[in-house]
Image: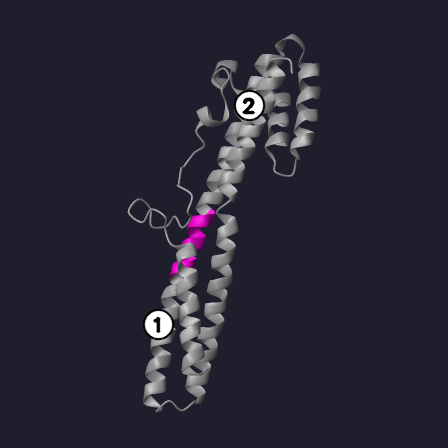
Amino acid sequence: MRPLSLALLAAGVLLAAPVAAPAQPKADPDWPCIQRKTPEIDLAQVWNGPDPASAGRWTDDQEAAAVAQKIASRRTPMDEVDVVLQLFAREAGPDASTRLLRVMAGAYEIINTERSRVMHGIERYARGQQRLADRIREEGDKLSQARTSSGSTDTAETKALDEQLTWDARIFDERARSLTYVCEMPVLLEQRAYEIGERIAARMKGG
């Protein structure tokens, strides 16, 4: 790689870095997303009905728990969520509202748990990016020193360092682009919790 292409590569790394840069460095340096870090979904933001805790432990109602697991799963399309809730409410009889409240409690807890796992994964991802960025800087310094020592003449050492730097920078760039999409996952899970809450509330009102 010639000095010009090396400079372009370095610029690419620097341009990619802001994607993975912490949005709130003083609050949590391991949080790389633009979206504000919130450890849990605020129940009030996804549910405006009765307190789900008033319906008792959702895990004690096996059918409600099964429905909660089903509708909380991202593999279940939202159109199918409506069908599942309709069938459950029909079979629940006079206790439908109470049992639907248990479903809401379960879905909320399940989604919150998944979201927490995703957020921990994002933080691990960001720490890995930081380690890779540190390594790229070290490799860049070594390459510069090797070129200086060789009088800017390519040697086996400079070629090996050049190849490693290029490879690591490419990985860094690809991971930085992927992080943009990964950071959307907590938001999508919160949106799912809200949509489920809306559907359950409508079903409790007889909709």
* Relative to 101, 17 lies left or right: left
Residue 104 — which label?
Answer: 2
* Relative to 170, 136 lies left or right: left
Residue, x 36% and y 65% (percent of image)? 134
Can residue 132 be seen here? The reply is: no
The residue where tag 1 is placed is 138
Q: Say which element carries label 2.
A: helix
* Other-residue count near label 2 (Cα within 10 Å), few / some / many at <14 / 14–19 / ≥20: many
Residue 113: x, y in percent? 49, 35
On screen, residue 186 above or below 104: below
Tell me which amino acid carries mark 2: Met
In 3D space, how far apart are the residues under numbered discs 2 and 1 (Cα atoms)?
Answer: 51 Å
Residue, x 40% and y 50% (percent of image)? 32
> Is residue 132 shown in magenta?
no
Q: Residue furthest top?
A: 94
* Other-residue count near label 1 (Cα within 10 Å), few / some / many at <14 / 14–19 / ≥20: few
Can residue 162 be seen here? The reply is: yes
Residue, x 41% and y 47% (percent of image)? 34
Residue 39 — which label?
Answer: none
Q: Earlier in the sequence, mark 2 or mark 1?
A: 2
* Relative to 103, 152 lies left or right: left
> Is residue 122 shown in magenta?
yes
- Dominant SS type (magenta): helix
Q: Say which element carries label 1.
A: helix
Residue 81: x, y in percent? 66, 28
Question: Is 195 in front, or is 120?
Answer: 195
On screen, residue 118 above or below 82: below
Question: Is 192 in front, or is 15?
Answer: 15
Tell me the quadrant of the picture where the C terminus can be found.
top right
Write down the region rendered in magenta: 121-130
